[in-house]
Structure formats: structure tokens, C-alpha cells
Amino acid sequence: MNIHTYEKLWLVGAMLLIVGFIATVTYGAVGVGVTMIDDSEETIDPTQLDEDERFSEPRVEQVGENEYDVYVVARQFMFQPDPIEVPAGSDVTFYVTSADVIHSFSVAGTNVNTMVIPGEVSTMTVEFDEPGEYGIVCNEYCGSGHHAMEAMLIVQPEDEFELEEGEN
Amino acid sequence: MADDFPPMTSIKRWLVTTNHKDVGILYLVTAMFFLLFGGILALLFRVQLWSSGYSILSDSGFNQSVSMHGLLMVFWFLSPIASGFANYLVPLQIGAKDLAFPRLNALSYWLYLFSGILIGISFFQGGTFAGGWTMYAPLNVPMYTPAIEATTGGNATILALTMFVVSITLGTVNFLTTIHRSRAEGMGLWNMPLFTWSWLLTVWMMLFAFAALLAALLLLATDRILLTQYFATDQGSSLLWAHIFWFFGHPEVYIVFFPALGIMFETFQTFTGRRLVGRKWVIIAMVLVAVQSFLVWMHHMFLTTINLEIKTLFMATTIGISLPFDLMVFALIYTMVKGRVRFTTPFLFSLGALVLFILGGITGVFLGAVVLDYEFRGTYWVVAHFHYVMVSGVTALVAGLYYWWPKISGKMYNETLGKIHFAVYFVGFNLLYFPMFLAWDTPRRVFHYQEGMEIWHQMATVGAFVFGFSFLIMFYTFGKSLVSGPDAPDNPWEFARTAEWAIPSPPPLENWPGRPSYRSGHLEFVDDAAEAAAATDGGTATGTDLARADHGHGHELDTHEHEEEHADHASIWPLGIGLGVFVLFVGLGGMTSSVAALIESLDPAYAEAAGLDGEFSYLYSGITLLGLAILTYVLFQFGLEEFNAPEMAIAERWPFENVGNTKLGVWIFLASDVVVFGAAIGAYVFMRIYAGWHTWGPVPDHTWAGLLNTYILLTSSFTVILALVMAERGNKKGLLATLGATLVLGLTFMGVKTWEWSDKFAQEDFWFSGIEYSLYYVTTGLHGLHVLLGLFLASFMIFRIVTIDAYLEDSRPVEFFGLYWHFVDIVWVILFPLFYLM
């Protein structure tokens, strides 16, 4: 069968594009390796966060050697706790929920980014390699003070990190 | 032609016209106005973004501008400008004289215009809606806005959108009936011009997608005005809104892009002088996209907590939907390769649209992958991506403006000016949106960004002004053409082959010099009267008659003189209905405070806890009543008016040969109503599963009352069937008796319902008392409204039978009413077990 040169070119181009897309997706899943949001569908009553074991006191908690849990409450127009301090090189699991409307929890410059939905707990585990200060922003519009809803994530060098009093 | 139809220079003409070309022009002009409106808002916030922290707008002002920019561009500009083209061109391309229901078409336009005016008013009612164009719950309900008073503008926005959706729904019913039932002889579906094809698929998608949005908006409006609890509580309301909204929202992307695609196909064919390569496959690809568009919505929710398995499935469907588009893109490119390109202004815009669409499409594939969404969601990458796609659509629509300008205005424009416009437009576009890819890390929806990004945002702002300026060149070009352009020939483009180019520019009121027909394989204008005369002479037309018999049109020859029937083109009542709905909605928008006052008197403890502090508003209550009064009057007049829109005697009607125009229209309308109820019932099921099914028992106390009502409605269905039998027999007394019985049964149903509700109220279970009560009152209330509407229709029909002996010669309206009534009954048969038994 005679295939026109242009057609061949387009076919090759199309194949390359498709292969490229698949490669990108695979790399994202395997190479970057974010654990996706938990699918356990746990729900929580956003009006009763004060009485919830985990979220009544938003905090950083050590749960094992090099394993930390962070409980974050997003509400109009702040994140609690602020700042969040975690050590570099450890597995940090964020549990984030909202006390009112939809927010997001996005750590600038990383792929920690999730919607925070009232009644749901978003969970993700990450490891920070680089010590430093990362900004946390809300990128779901959440009301008149939305632009001011910011917090700080401080990743301490491993040897300098210690939990403050009352946080553990 | 109507003798009293005013000329185009008269203002009255534009208020009463129902002609598809006039309505098309009205749509195009109004849509351009909203383009300017939305564009100026965009310029305002682009200035604000000149540097981080620069401030010309208040915080709320910024949020209002961004939200309204999105709403106006998507709803009041993109869809209506496509409607404008479709109104003008679809009947011309398929060889019809007008749409199937011309008055309904005018009504669509007036509802659109008045909904736009309502949006305009909302800016002055304590601020318009500021919660983003996606209107996410629960931020969209009064609970989270500072003061009840401030919600009037937001309510007006929601109601305006509701009104717009009603306009769209009427339009889809009209276009679906027209395209399926009024094609010229010999024009099968495969032969339809590609713009008409794209529009046919657009309206099919609109029919179902907008119905879901209508349901969402109705629920939201009851939340905001009657203070029900759908989106106010924490019981899954955020996810409920996101599901319904995006079930509409993703098909909407193709809804706004398909007409643009259709214009690209048309212009590519004309200016390469070649039929589109793989035309059949392109059509199949479009059909695939239209179907698949309803299966991708959850990719807007990748960052919520829904199941990973479901997300993966939706990732597959999302990336899959790009494949048919690849086919279309390659078909366009190959058409260029095989043809001889003439670089006219419309072609340049179409080519530009293709280039931009490729960029927008490729950048979108990344967003379709769940993992990458963690990087990209909420950033300017998304903003840049969808503007490349959407505004590439706008580029093709501008191509359409240039392409059909000579046909619509009858004047040629200046090619040099057109090309200058294209150059400025294309540079401005890329200067505006490309830097957003480079500054992709900037978070969306805020006016703060990192310092290093300033240069890109400043480029974008400059680009925005260049882009905006390019439209001034366009207006100048068109203005100059109108004033001093040379007259346009029938077909200025030489290779344009669709039917609109075979008639004068601009086309006469009745479009065609004879009956358009493709019987012989190409377009001819048949003079039926002359042919019939020739046939009686035993002349050459015998073969024609045979051919017609083959087509199954033989029996229609008898009614052939009806084709010369007088067709009406003028009615003032569509404008009246638009005005009535507008006044009613202005009133309703301000009712929240009165409802809050009512709640305070009904249930002081609840009002105290919810912090309600309302005051009865005489102003808005008065406006609401005035709107109802106007609406009742104009609907009554609309029903009385004699308006003749003859069906085409000879037409291609596959696959609806045996269904009359109005009947098909009713069926299509009911199909969209199924989705409205589907979404409302779906909301009930979703909320109940979310809460745990057995967390609540059935809300109504008396199962027997629901059962009784079920029997009453089923009996009334039976009386409606009897009514049809009586009408067919021409039995006036029987018809009156059976319709009267239907009316009485319907009233009994409403009576039982009223008793049930007042019984619940006596126990202090109100519509605002909790989500389970809101679900019960709103869902059965929506059904009750349908029953009420049916009762009004039945009363009107009884009035007509008494006054003018209606329906005895033509029983079809009784049948149409019956279809609606049976549908309402069936809905109840579903509601009864859901709310009373489970």
C-alpha cells in the first residue's frame, strides 16, 4: 500500500505525541511518586471539629521513627497550625480538613496540593528533601479574605528538628 | 409575506420579529455587547495584576470582576454568538424558511437579553456574585456571606443564569425539531453542511447538559431565597454541587467549542477549494466527542477525596476524548495540504484558531492526568490552557463574522483592514496568554503572586490591551463596510458551496426563490405550482412524481397548496414573556430577607440559632407580584394569538418522519425535563447515601396520603386519554367532561398535598429545618409546580373549548397536553416510593 509521505510524517508525529503523553503520565505516577489521596472516604462533621480527637488541636505529631502526622484545619481565612514545622527526610502525612467552605492546601513549589472539602479529610504522605521555608496558599476561592489565606511550612534540617512543647 | 411586517429600519420590527435571520442578528449584536462587558472586566483585573499588591479594585471588586468575567464570557457571549450564527445560517444551510417554532425562537432571544439586563442590575444590588464562575458550594449560599442584604445581587446573578438556561432549553427544542424535520428534499443527515452538523451536536449536548445545570440552579436558588439546606449544610453538599455542576460543565466546553469547529470546517473547505478530507470520519468523531463529553466530568474533581479507581477511569476517558479531536485536527491540516489555500481574513482567523487550539489541546492533556493535577491544579497553567482553548473558539467565531459578514450585511469589508485586525489579534492573544504558561506557578484566584513573576504578568496585561484594541479594529472595519463598503455578490467566496451562498446577500425575508431541493444531487429551486401544471399536461414532470412517490411524499402533494400558506413573522408576546419573567426574577432575588422574617415568626429558635435577621420587603414582594401578573397576562395572550408557522410540505425528516413538529418538540422538551428531575432525584439519593440511608426515615407521616395521591394521578392520566378520544370524535361535551375531570383530579391531588404540608408545618417540620426536609419539600414541590402548570394548561384548554370550540377539528393539542400530563404522573410514581416508602 502506498502511503503519502505527508501522511507518514503525521502518523509518526502522532505516535510520538501519544508515546510522550503516556511517558509523562507514567513518570508522574512512578517517578515522582506521590501517594494519591486516600480512598477510605472518611467523613467528619465540620461543625464539630472542636470535639474531634485529631482536629481539636491542629498539630504536628511524631508517630514513629522518621514518621510524622500533621493535622491541619483550614478555615476562613487561615490554616492551623501556622507555621507547620517538620523535619527534612522524613515521611510526613498531612490530614487536612475544612471547618467551613472549600479551601485548598497547596505548598508552593512542591506537588503537595489538594482540595480541602468540608466533611472530608484529605490525606497525603510526602517526604521533603530540601530544608527551607515553603509558602502555603489556598487556591480555591473561599470568600472576601481569600487572598490573605496563607501559612508557612518550615522544613528543618533533620538534626536541628525537635517538636516544641505541647505539640507532641 | 405579512403585509403589516415593519421594515428593518423600524424599531418596531426588532421588537416583534420572529424571523430567524432577524433573531440571528439580534443575538450576534447582543453577544458582541457582552463580549465588551466581559472584556472590560478582564482589563480591570489585568491592570490590578500589573504588580503583586497593586490595587485599583477593592478585594471584593476583584473577586466580582473575575467571577462575572467568567460567567459573562461563557454564558452571555460564547453560547449566544454561536446561537446567532445558528439562527441565521442553519435554516439557510438546510433549505428551510424558518425555524420550526419562530415565536419560541424570539422568546429564547428575549429571555437571553433580559437575563443579561438582570446581570447588569445585580452589580447595583450590593455587589454581584463573587464566588467564582463555578459557584462552588457551600460558599454560594447566604450562610457564608456576611449579611443577608448583600445576597440580593448574588441572587439576581443566579436567577439571571436560570433565565438564560431556560432560554437555551427552548432554543435546543427548536433547533432539534428544525434540523430533524425541515431539511430540504434530498438532504440526508450525512449531506448536511458541517456547521449545521456541529450545531446539531451542540444542541443535543445542550439539551442534557443545561438541564442538569438548571436543576443545580433551581436547588441553589431555593437555598438562597427560601433558605433550604441543600448546600448550606456539611452533609456532602460540596461534592453534590461539584458533581452536578461539572456534569454540565465539561460538556459545556464542547458546547461552546463545537460551533467554532463547524466554522473552521466551513472556512477551510471554502478557502482551500476542497471538500474536507475524511468528512465522514470527522462527523463520526464529533458524534463520539458529544457522547463521551458526558463521561469525563470528574477530572475537575481529581483533587477531591473521591475514589482513586474512579479517578483513574475518568483519566482514561479524559485522555481518550482527545483522540477524536486529533482526527479532526489532522483532517483540517490535510485539507490544507491537498487544497489551494487562499489567505483571506476569515481563513487567517480559522487557521489561527487551529494553531491556538492545538496548543490549548496539548497543554490540556497534562491536566487530564491525575498525578500532574497535583502540580497544576489552581495555577495559571489551567488559566492559560482553557483560555487557549476557549479563545481559540472565539478566534474561529471571529472568522465566522468575517466569512458571513457579506451575506448578512450585503456589503464587502476591506480585506487589508481585516488582515491588520488578524495580525493585531494574534499578537495580542499570544502576548496575553502565553506568558501565563511561563508564569504557571502563580496561584489562581488571588491577586498576589511571587515577585519573579512580575514580568510575565506585565506582558500579559499589555497583551490584554492589544487584544482588546484589536476588536476596535474589527468594529471599525465592519462599520466602514456598512457605511461605504461595496455591495456583496451572492457568493463572494467562489468555492463556498452551502445553500446560503446561492441566494442574494442579504437574503429576502422568505429566503428562497422556490422550494430548495437536492433531489437531483445538487441544489435546485423547484417551482411546485409550475411542475404540477406541467404534470396535468402530461408533460415532463411524470418522472418527478414517481420519484416523489418513492420518497413517500405522495400523500403530501394534496396539501401542497398549504406551502403557499401565509406565514407570520411578527409577535409582540415573546418580548412580553421575557419582560414578565424578568420582573418576576428581579422581585424574587430580593425575597430572602422576607423569607427570613417569615422563618423568624415560624420558628424563632431556629432563626436565632441560624442568625437570621430579616425584614419583610414590600418593595420586592410587590415586584414579584407585578411580575406574576404580567406573566399571567402575556402567557394568556401568547396562547390566544393566531400565529401561523407552516410545516414544510416536502422535507427530509429522518428519523422522525411520522412525528409532527410540535409533538417532536414536546418529546424533546420532556427529555430535558427528565434530566432536571433526574438531577433533583439524584441529589436526594446522593445526600441520603452520604448520610447513611437509614439515618432518616420517610419524612411524610401518612403513607396512605401518598398512595391516595398516586391513585388520583393515575386516574387523571386515564381521563386525559379519554379526552383525546373525545376530541378525535369531535364530541364537545365529552371533551369538556373528561378535561374537567382531569382538572378536578389534579386539584384534589394539590389539595391532599396542601393538607400534608400544613400537617407537617403544624409539627414544626419546615423546609429549612434540615436537609431531609429540604429534599422532601423541594423535590415534591418541583413536581407540584409541574402539576400546577398542567392545571393552568387544562384550564386554558377548557376556556378555549367553551369559547371557540377548539380541538374538535384538530385534536393534536389535547395529545400534546396528555404527553406532558403522563410525564408528570410517571415522575410521581417514582417520587412516591422514594419519599414515602423507603
Image (cartoon, coloured by chain):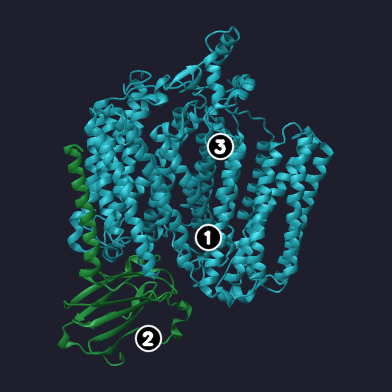
Q: Chain A is drawn in which colour?
A: green
Q: Nearer the viewer, mark 3 or mark 1?
A: 3
What chain does mark 2 sit on? A
Q: How crowded is mark 3: few (under 14 residues within 10 Å), some or many (20 or more)?
A: few
Q: Distance between the residues labelled 3 and 1?
A: 37 Å
Q: Is residue B117 left or right of residue B253?
A: right
In terms of secondary structure, where does tag 3 sit?
Answer: loop
User: Could you tell which of marks 3 and 1 lies nearer the N-terminus?
Assistant: 1
Residue under pointer 2: A57
Please name the residue shown 20% across and 69% down the image. A31
Picture coordinates of residue B339, whole percent (x, y): 24, 29
Q: Using the rendered image of the protein, determine whether residue B274 is visible from the camera's viewpoint.
A: yes
Residue under pointer 3: B656
Same chain for mark 2 and mark 1? The answer is no
Picture coordinates of residue A20, whole percent (x, y): 20, 56
Hey, which quadrant is residue A86 in on the image? Answer: bottom left
Q: Residue B778 bears which disc, if any?
A: none
Hey, which quadrant is residue B602 in on the image? Answer: bottom right
Chain drawn cyan in the picture: B
The quadrant the C terminus of chain A occupies is bottom left
What chain does mark 3 sit on? B
Q: Residue B220 bears which disc, if any?
A: 1
Q: How far apart are marks 2 and 1 (CA)?
A: 34 Å
Q: How far apart are marks 3 and 2 (CA)?
A: 65 Å
